[in-house]
Image (cartoon, helix red, strand yellow):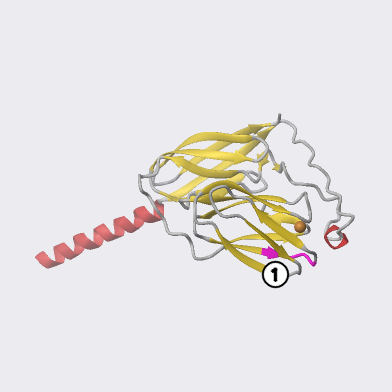
Amino acid sequence: MKRLARYTLTLAFAVTGATQLLAQGAVTGTVKFTGAAPANPKIDMAEEPICKAKYTTAPTDPVVVVNKGGLGNVFISVTSGLPAGAKAAAPSTPGTIDQQGCLYHPRVFGVMAGQSIEIKNSDAVLHNIKAMPKKNRGFNISQPTAGMKTMKTFPVAEAAVPFECNVHGWMKAKVFVMDTPYFAVSDENGAFSLKGLPAGTYTLEAWHEKYGTKTATVTVTATGGTATFTFAAS
Ligand SMILES: [Cu+2]
Protein backbone atom coordinates (compact mmCIF):
# COMPACT_ATOMS: atom_id res chain seq x y z
CA MET A 1 0.00 0.00 0.00
CA LYS A 2 2.80 2.37 0.94
CA ARG A 3 4.60 1.51 -2.28
CA LEU A 4 1.46 2.15 -4.31
CA ALA A 5 1.01 5.57 -2.70
CA ARG A 6 4.55 6.54 -3.51
CA TYR A 7 4.11 5.36 -7.08
CA THR A 8 0.91 7.39 -7.46
CA LEU A 9 2.61 10.48 -6.09
CA THR A 10 5.51 10.10 -8.52
CA LEU A 11 3.16 9.61 -11.43
CA ALA A 12 1.09 12.65 -10.47
CA PHE A 13 4.23 14.77 -10.32
CA ALA A 14 5.39 13.51 -13.71
CA VAL A 15 2.05 14.30 -15.35
CA THR A 16 1.92 17.77 -13.81
CA GLY A 17 5.46 18.47 -14.98
CA ALA A 18 4.61 17.39 -18.51
CA THR A 19 1.50 19.57 -18.55
CA GLN A 20 3.51 22.60 -17.48
CA LEU A 21 6.03 21.95 -20.22
CA LEU A 22 3.29 21.67 -22.83
CA ALA A 23 1.66 24.85 -21.57
CA GLN A 24 4.86 26.86 -21.98
CA GLY A 25 4.91 28.66 -25.06
CA ALA A 26 2.90 30.79 -26.87
CA VAL A 27 3.51 34.46 -27.03
CA THR A 28 1.44 35.47 -29.99
CA GLY A 29 1.56 38.96 -31.32
CA THR A 30 1.17 41.48 -34.05
CA VAL A 31 3.37 44.18 -35.46
CA LYS A 32 1.03 46.94 -36.53
CA PHE A 33 1.75 49.66 -39.03
CA THR A 34 -0.06 52.99 -39.00
CA GLY A 35 -0.11 55.56 -41.76
CA ALA A 36 0.52 55.12 -45.46
CA ALA A 37 3.12 52.54 -46.36
CA PRO A 38 5.75 54.05 -48.67
CA ALA A 39 6.19 52.65 -52.15
CA ASN A 40 9.15 50.31 -52.34
CA PRO A 41 11.95 51.11 -54.80
CA LYS A 42 11.59 49.49 -58.21
CA ILE A 43 14.35 47.15 -59.28
CA ASP A 44 15.60 47.22 -62.85
CA MET A 45 16.33 43.58 -63.70
CA ALA A 46 16.79 44.23 -67.45
CA GLU A 47 20.29 42.79 -67.30
CA GLU A 48 19.07 39.58 -65.65
CA PRO A 49 16.27 38.36 -67.93
CA ILE A 50 16.16 34.98 -66.16
CA CYS A 51 15.23 36.74 -62.92
CA LYS A 52 13.03 39.31 -64.60
CA ALA A 53 10.99 36.51 -66.20
CA LYS A 54 10.01 35.30 -62.71
CA TYR A 55 7.86 38.40 -62.14
CA THR A 56 4.53 39.32 -63.66
CA THR A 57 4.82 42.93 -62.46
CA ALA A 58 7.89 45.13 -62.06
CA PRO A 59 9.89 43.77 -59.10
CA THR A 60 10.47 46.03 -56.12
CA ASP A 61 12.86 45.96 -53.18
CA PRO A 62 10.59 44.80 -50.33
CA VAL A 63 11.87 47.20 -47.67
CA VAL A 64 8.41 47.87 -46.21
CA VAL A 65 5.96 44.97 -46.35
CA VAL A 66 2.51 46.03 -45.11
CA ASN A 67 -0.69 43.97 -45.40
CA LYS A 68 -3.93 44.31 -43.45
CA GLY A 69 -2.32 46.94 -41.21
CA GLY A 70 0.53 44.64 -40.20
CA LEU A 71 4.27 45.07 -40.85
CA GLY A 72 6.28 42.10 -42.10
CA ASN A 73 9.99 41.26 -41.83
CA VAL A 74 10.24 42.52 -38.26
CA PHE A 75 12.64 40.54 -36.08
CA ILE A 76 11.29 39.96 -32.56
CA SER A 77 13.41 38.65 -29.72
CA VAL A 78 13.54 38.50 -25.92
CA THR A 79 15.99 41.04 -24.52
CA SER A 80 15.41 40.54 -20.78
CA GLY A 81 13.57 38.34 -18.31
CA LEU A 82 15.12 35.00 -19.15
CA PRO A 83 16.70 33.13 -16.23
CA ALA A 84 20.41 33.92 -15.90
CA GLY A 85 22.51 31.39 -17.72
CA ALA A 86 19.56 30.03 -19.69
CA LYS A 87 21.11 28.17 -22.58
CA ALA A 88 19.65 26.09 -25.33
CA ALA A 89 21.39 23.89 -27.84
CA ALA A 90 21.43 25.03 -31.44
CA PRO A 91 19.01 23.04 -33.62
CA SER A 92 20.58 20.43 -35.88
CA THR A 93 18.40 21.54 -38.78
CA PRO A 94 19.86 24.52 -40.64
CA GLY A 95 18.32 27.92 -41.14
CA THR A 96 17.87 28.57 -44.84
CA ILE A 97 18.18 31.50 -47.17
CA ASP A 98 17.33 31.20 -50.84
CA GLN A 99 18.21 33.39 -53.80
CA GLN A 100 15.11 33.38 -55.94
CA GLY A 101 14.20 35.90 -58.63
CA CYS A 102 17.36 37.83 -57.72
CA LEU A 103 16.03 38.53 -54.23
CA TYR A 104 16.82 36.91 -50.90
CA HIS A 105 14.13 34.80 -49.27
CA PRO A 106 13.69 35.41 -46.44
CA ARG A 107 14.90 38.98 -46.25
CA VAL A 108 15.17 38.80 -42.44
CA PHE A 109 15.71 35.64 -40.44
CA GLY A 110 17.27 34.29 -37.27
CA VAL A 111 19.42 31.33 -36.39
CA MET A 112 21.08 30.27 -33.18
CA ALA A 113 24.81 30.67 -32.68
CA GLY A 114 26.40 27.51 -34.01
CA GLN A 115 23.39 26.58 -36.13
CA SER A 116 24.13 25.94 -39.78
CA ILE A 117 22.81 28.30 -42.44
CA GLU A 118 22.04 26.76 -45.81
CA ILE A 119 22.52 29.28 -48.60
CA LYS A 120 20.81 28.19 -51.78
CA ASN A 121 20.70 29.50 -55.36
CA SER A 122 17.37 28.87 -57.09
CA ASP A 123 18.27 31.12 -60.04
CA ALA A 124 20.14 30.04 -63.15
CA VAL A 125 22.34 33.12 -62.78
CA LEU A 126 25.54 33.91 -60.91
CA HIS A 127 25.00 35.16 -57.37
CA ASN A 128 27.70 36.20 -54.97
CA ILE A 129 27.00 36.15 -51.26
CA LYS A 130 28.97 38.55 -49.12
CA ALA A 131 28.31 38.32 -45.38
CA MET A 132 29.63 41.19 -43.28
CA PRO A 133 29.47 40.35 -39.59
CA LYS A 134 31.47 42.27 -36.97
CA LYS A 135 31.85 39.62 -34.27
CA ASN A 136 31.95 36.56 -36.53
CA ARG A 137 34.10 35.80 -39.54
CA GLY A 138 32.70 37.10 -42.80
CA PHE A 139 32.68 35.32 -46.12
CA ASN A 140 32.38 36.09 -49.80
CA ILE A 141 31.34 33.20 -52.01
CA SER A 142 30.05 32.68 -55.53
CA GLN A 143 27.18 30.44 -56.54
CA PRO A 144 27.25 30.42 -60.35
CA THR A 145 24.57 27.80 -61.05
CA ALA A 146 21.05 26.94 -60.02
CA GLY A 147 20.72 24.38 -57.25
CA MET A 148 23.99 25.25 -55.53
CA LYS A 149 24.01 25.05 -51.75
CA THR A 150 26.61 26.28 -49.30
CA MET A 151 26.59 25.73 -45.54
CA LYS A 152 27.92 28.41 -43.21
CA THR A 153 27.88 28.88 -39.44
CA PHE A 154 28.30 31.87 -37.17
CA PRO A 155 29.52 30.76 -33.72
CA VAL A 156 28.85 34.04 -31.84
CA ALA A 157 25.58 35.89 -31.23
CA GLU A 158 25.32 39.01 -33.38
CA ALA A 159 22.38 41.13 -34.49
CA ALA A 160 21.51 42.04 -38.07
CA VAL A 161 24.46 40.58 -39.96
CA PRO A 162 24.21 41.98 -43.51
CA PHE A 163 24.13 39.70 -46.54
CA GLU A 164 24.68 41.32 -49.93
CA CYS A 165 25.17 40.16 -53.48
CA ASN A 166 28.14 41.63 -55.30
CA VAL A 167 26.51 40.92 -58.66
CA HIS A 168 23.11 42.47 -57.90
CA GLY A 169 23.52 45.56 -55.76
CA TRP A 170 19.86 45.59 -54.70
CA MET A 171 20.00 42.17 -53.03
CA LYS A 172 20.05 42.58 -49.26
CA ALA A 173 19.21 40.36 -46.28
CA LYS A 174 19.86 40.36 -42.56
CA VAL A 175 20.49 37.40 -40.29
CA PHE A 176 20.27 37.57 -36.51
CA VAL A 177 22.54 35.11 -34.70
CA MET A 178 20.96 34.36 -31.33
CA ASP A 179 21.97 32.79 -27.99
CA THR A 180 18.43 31.59 -27.27
CA PRO A 181 15.65 30.03 -29.36
CA TYR A 182 13.14 32.75 -28.42
CA PHE A 183 12.88 34.79 -31.59
CA ALA A 184 10.57 35.18 -34.55
CA VAL A 185 10.04 37.18 -37.73
CA SER A 186 6.68 38.77 -38.44
CA ASP A 187 4.91 37.40 -41.50
CA GLU A 188 3.54 39.50 -44.35
CA ASN A 189 0.54 40.45 -42.16
CA GLY A 190 2.66 41.35 -39.13
CA ALA A 191 1.82 38.22 -37.13
CA PHE A 192 4.42 36.36 -35.08
CA SER A 193 4.66 33.80 -32.31
CA LEU A 194 7.39 32.97 -29.82
CA LYS A 195 7.25 29.40 -28.64
CA GLY A 196 8.43 27.65 -25.51
CA LEU A 197 8.81 30.60 -23.13
CA PRO A 198 8.53 29.66 -19.46
CA ALA A 199 6.05 31.65 -17.37
CA GLY A 200 7.50 35.05 -16.50
CA THR A 201 7.70 38.68 -17.51
CA TYR A 202 9.86 39.59 -20.45
CA THR A 203 11.02 42.54 -22.46
CA LEU A 204 10.66 41.95 -26.18
CA GLU A 205 12.36 43.95 -28.86
CA ALA A 206 11.09 44.36 -32.40
CA TRP A 207 13.55 45.47 -35.08
CA HIS A 208 12.73 46.75 -38.54
CA GLU A 209 15.40 47.70 -41.08
CA LYS A 210 13.80 51.09 -41.88
CA TYR A 211 11.88 51.97 -38.73
CA GLY A 212 14.33 50.87 -36.05
CA THR A 213 13.41 49.21 -32.76
CA LYS A 214 10.46 49.15 -30.36
CA THR A 215 10.16 47.36 -27.06
CA ALA A 216 7.22 45.79 -25.28
CA THR A 217 6.70 44.01 -21.98
CA VAL A 218 4.83 40.73 -21.99
CA THR A 219 3.75 38.52 -19.11
CA VAL A 220 3.61 34.86 -19.99
CA THR A 221 1.37 32.62 -17.93
CA ALA A 222 0.59 28.93 -18.33
CA THR A 223 -1.80 29.91 -21.09
CA GLY A 224 0.72 32.14 -22.87
CA GLY A 225 0.76 35.85 -23.52
CA THR A 226 0.26 38.47 -26.19
CA ALA A 227 2.40 41.35 -27.41
CA THR A 228 1.72 44.18 -29.82
CA PHE A 229 4.16 46.56 -31.46
CA THR A 230 3.17 49.60 -33.50
CA PHE A 231 5.38 51.24 -36.08
CA ALA A 232 4.27 54.43 -37.78
CA ALA A 233 4.97 55.73 -41.25
CA SER A 234 7.60 58.47 -41.19
CU1 LIG B 1 22.72 38.10 -56.93
Q: Is residue 220 above or below residue 166?
A: above
* Residue 122 magenta-highlighted: yes
68 left or right of 79 in image: right
The location of residue 160, given as percent across then percent down, is 59, 46
Q: Nearer the viewer, residue 220 or 147?
A: 147
Find the residue positioned furthest to the left: 2
Quarter of image, ligand 1: bottom right
* Residue 210 magenta-highlighted: no
Secondary structure found at label 1:
loop
The location of residue 91, given as percent across then percent down, is 48, 62
Residue that mark 1 sits on: 148
Q: Residue at x 78, y 59 (%)?
A: 101
203 left or right of 228 in image: left
The location of residue 221, given as percent across then percent down, is 39, 43
Residue range (magenta): 120-124
Q: Is residue 193 visible?
A: no
Q: Residue at x 79, y 67 (%)?
A: 124
Residue type, numbered disc 1: Met
